[in-house]
Amino acid sequence: MRALMIAAALLASAAPAAALAQTAAPAATAPTSAFERDRQSILAEAGQFRVRFDFRENVAFLAGYTPIEAHDSAGNEIVRVVYDHGDRISLQHILVMEHEGQSIVVKHWREDWTYQPSTVLTYSGPGEWTLSNVPEAERAGAWSQTVWQTDDSPRYGGVGKWSYDNGMAVWTSGPTWRPLARRDAVRHPVYDRYLGTNRHALTPVGWVHIQDNMKMQPGQGDDGDPVAVVQEDVVNTYRKWDGYDPKAGDDYWAATKDYWAAVRDLWDAAIAAHGGVRVQEVAETGAVTGTPLMDLAEKVQSGEVTTAAAIDQAKTIIATATAR
């Protein structure tokens, strides 16, 4: 987990990158169907990027709350296709940073896309996720996006459709509950979750993830509705850039992908067994499983443990963390 801590510090202190070339992506062959057009839009998020993360709290809705100052960070991130099964696509984000002349690689978040899903994994509140049914009327032409933490524990899921109006390719989710991101969780603020709308849009030089978040605090009593604290805009911009060597990130993924495939299966099994999952949230690492599962991956890459042995240990870690 030392790599994750270093990467977090580098992201927080990253200076603005040099101007990047505004080169438009080459024209693609026109897709043969709306479904294929959506697929190509999702797959366009894969590649090698310079990423800028911009966060801005705008309007307070809770008396006495003062929005924190806007802040931003930047880093190098590759996005690789884990699998493409037609109506199911998985993309893995991997940070590739430099620190004191050494490459620092951190397996970052993962996004899974499913066409016309019957269910989606949604955040239910602190430490709990539920496999929620998607009404049949909302499935036609829609895609779910499920986002996972660095250790492949769940983060949030939502459903939306791609649109292509006004020359833009944009996927827009419905209102989606999410746990706090590390940037907020480590401050232990008065709010404990987000209710947000996510948009993914392609640009001539990459793509952008735009979030409209309402930060919420728990309501009064067990049945009290969450209370709005402050509205936040987040703009995460992915610009294609070949100004760094992605080899360290690709080497990490090549060495650990079989381990992580097994970890994904273990999480899927835990979710299927209970129609959702409970796992303790941890501010610094997302979930209580974060440090041990990420450490095992580092040991697999270094050869300290075999993939099979790491998978056996991961079974125990996930089973213990999700026991009811």
Image (cartoon, helix red, strand yellow):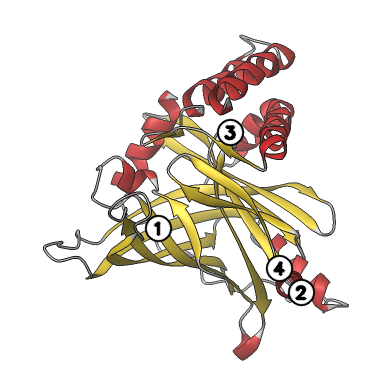
- Tell me if mark 1 has few (under 14), some (14-19) or many (20+) residues whose alpha carbon lies within 10 angstroms of its own: many
Q: Are marks 2 and 1 in contact (CB under 8 Å)?
A: no
Q: Which residue is mark 1?
A: 194
- Of the residues shown, which amino acid type is indicated by label 4? Pro
**Label number found at residue 248:** 3
The answer to whether residue 99 shows anywhere in this view is: no
Q: Which residue is mark 2?
A: 141
Residue 304 visible in the shown view: yes
Q: Is residue 208 above or below residue 150?
A: below
Which residue is disc 4 drawn over? 135
Disc 2 residue type (three-letter): Gly
- Distance Cα–Cα, label 3 vs label 1: 34 Å
- Tell me whether the residue at label 3 lies in contact with that at label 1, contact meaning CB atoms closer than 8 angstroms: no
Q: From the image, state whether disc 4 or disc 3 is nearer to you.
A: 4
The secondary structure type at the circle numbered 1 is strand
Which of 307 and 282 lies nearest the eye of the viewer? 282
Residue appearing at x 67%, y 74% in the figure: 161
Q: Position of residue 160 (x, y in %)?
A: 63, 70
